[in-house]
Image: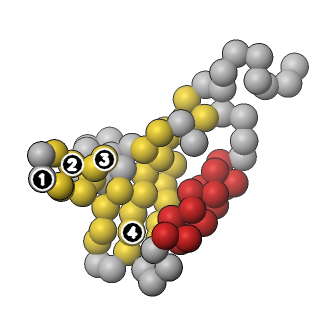
Amino acid sequence: MDRLSSGPFGALCTPVPGGRIEGVSLRDGRILVGVVARLGRPLPEVAADVHNAVREVVSDRRVHVSIEDVTPAPTGSLPG
């Protein structure tokens, strides 16, 4: 994962005093997480890793992870 993402319209966020946390939102009892993935790993694996990390902290809610965008892998990290 490269970073969290608030989505194309900036709606995936949580308001907090002094600003907002982009890329994480609580809606209808679900935790929604938006991420920007880095090329080099299968996207389902990236989503599963993020999902599992969130579930370790918050086990009583459903977690939905969306890959909002993809960035290039660091130079030299992909085979070929």
Can you tell which of label 2 and label 1 is closer to the viewer?
1
Identify which residue is drawn at 48% across, 55% down: 66
User: Which numbered disc flags the more N-terminal residue, 4 or 1?
Assistant: 1
Describe the element under mark 2 as helix, strand or loop: strand
Mark seen at residue 20: 2
Tell me which corner region of the image, top left, top right, bottom left or bottom right, holds residue 26: bottom left
Can you tell which of label 4 and label 2 is closer to the viewer?
2
User: Total number of numbered labels?
Assistant: 4
Mark seen at residue 17: 1
Describe the element under mark 1 as helix, strand or loop: loop
User: Which numbered disc flags the more N-terminal residue, 1 or 3?
Assistant: 1
Callout 1 amino acid: Pro
As drawn, 29 above or below 9: below
Callout 4 amino acid: Ile
Query: What is the CA distance from the residue labelled 2 to the residue labelled 1?
Result: 7 Å
Identify which residue is drawn at 55% across, 71% down: 56
- Residue carrying label 4: 31
